Structures are given as structure tokens and as C-alpha cells.
Amino acid sequence: MLPTIQLFSAYYKPFPLLPKADYVTPVQAGAAITPIKLAMQGDDTGDNMSELNPFYSELTVAYWVMKNVDRTKADAWGLCHYRRYFIEDKYKLFVKKRSRYYYRTSQKILDNILTPKLYTTLQELLLCHDVIVQRPVWAMKEKGIVYTIKDAYTEAHFKEDYDAMIEVVVEKFPDFTKSIDNYGQLTKMCYNNMMIARWSVWDDYLHFLFTVLKEVQHRINMHKEGYQSRVFGFLAERLHNLFIYHHQLKAAHLTLGLFEDKL
């Protein structure tokens, strides 16, 4: 029997596109700390961590779903973004599947993406896979230099934060120790904290994720400016990949459609 799926799309601000498909629910992230109230469910009801959104980004929506959504409504759920969605695969030359595909901001295009056909594709993939994630891309590649996941983080963010994260993983989940070194030397990963999986997989992952990040909060400087303030969102991307790698989860890879007008 095909699993039922509900996707949750994290919104941070007003955006001209809204999903019309009934299998996608928009949720306002950080609703507790903004005067702007969007016409959708907020992540600030029930058991929530909405006030930490500046640091945790879309993860406050994941936490809200885990704690508050009626689990009888769907067998599996997924996290996506107001301008990033899983799509049917797109191809480059020589039949190479893309990791990302850019669209202009258009409601018609979004409607043509979030179709019953896509929903069926997601259902069929979950029949024989543990998770659906973005097709992996280079962790970082600049001027012909390919960086490992570990080195890419320290180039783009703060090394001490990554080190604190690894330290906590080893302390809290010692069975990950052997996986960590091998994982850190990989050169490709999935970004954006987007995943579709059954509730049991999400529960195991989010227990791991928030156990680690809540301890890291006490060990790093959280007072970063601008882009870097989303430190736990960035660390989570690495923990997400580590969790899949360590547990050898069977992953289905799809293209991400991004509405960023990069045409």
C-alpha cells in the first residue's frame, strides 16, 4: 500500500507563491517573534521553539510538526521551503540528473510542479527507500579545488562551531564515533535540511538532532550577525547527512526546484 504523505513548507516572510496542492501545508517559521502574521499556520502554537528561529531557521517548523501535528493524518511527512520544493528529476547534458533547477517566480510554474503525479512519485519512492533528499552536490568547490564536508564548513562558517558539534555527538552518541571521521572526508552532501520520511525515521533523526544542537547552544557563541546567525541551521545540514550516513539509510535522490529567478 502506498504511504500517505504531507509536506510542510516553511515561510519566513510574505512571498507571492503559495502551494495549492492539498498535500502541502504552509507554516510560518518564527511566528512568535514577528509582527507580520501570514495567512497560514504558525510554528508558535502548542509545544514549540518558534522564538529560536533566527538561529534554527526552518528547524523550528520541523520541531513544531514533530510535537503538534496529528500523526494519524499521514504515514510520512516532509520539510520544504517557500521557494524550494522537491520536483520530478531534471537533466543536464548527457542524461546527468541535476541537483538543483532554477525557476522564475511564478504561481503557474509552482502549480505545475506540485501535481498529483509528483505526489505519486514521492509515494512510490518511499515504498523502497527510507528517505527522500536532495541529490548530493559538492560541499564546496572553488577554482577547481574540491573541499571535504568538514573543510567546507570551516571555510564558509566557524571552525569552532563544527568542532563543538562533533564533540557533542561523540559524547552523546558514542556509536557515531567511527562514522564521523569517514563522513567528514566526504566531498558531497545534501543541503537545505529538506527530507521526506516516515514518522519513525523523523523521530529518530530529530531526537538525535535536537539533543546535539541544544547542548551545542551552551558551548558556542550564538551572537553572530546576519547570515551566520543561522548557525544551527548550518550545523543541522551536516548532522542530517551524518545521520543518514551512519545509519546507512536507503536514500532516494531528487532534484530541488528553486524559485530564485536565476534564469
Image (cartoon, rainbow, N blue to C red):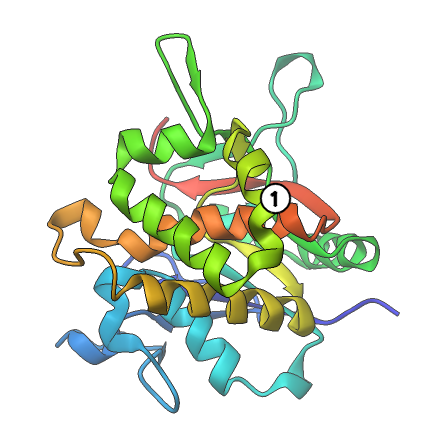
Q: Is residue 198 above or below residue 222?
A: below
| Image-quadrant location for residue 223 | bottom left
Residue 130, relative to residue 49: is it above or below?
A: above
Outermost residue on the bottom side: it is: 46
Q: Among all residues in the image, which is located at the extreme top?
A: 144
Image side of residue 116 versus residue 259, left or right: right
Q: Residue at x 57, y 49 (%)?
A: 177
Residue 221 to residue 263: above or below: below
* Residue 35 horizontal/vertical position (percent): 12, 77
Crowd around label 1: few <14 · some 14–19 · many ≥20 (10 Å): some
Q: Is residue 83 visible?
A: no
In this rendering, would 203 be left or right of 139? right
Residue 87 placed where, x, y %?
A: 59, 45
Between 24 and 45, the residue placed more toward the observer is: 45
Q: Quadrant of the C terminus?
A: top left
Residue at figure coordinates x 17%, y 56% from the top left: 221
Q: Residue at x 34, y 29 (%)?
A: 262
Instruction: Report the residue at 55% width, 62% height from top.
Output: 173
Callout 1 amino acid: Ser
Residue 204 to residue 262: above or below: below
Question: Foreground: 240 or 134?
Answer: 240
Q: Nearer the viewer, residue 35 or 117?
A: 35
Q: Give the percent coordinates (x, y) of residue 249.
A: 72, 51
Q: Secondary structure at mark 1?
A: helix
Which residue was labeled with disc 1? 179
Residue 159 in view of the camera: yes
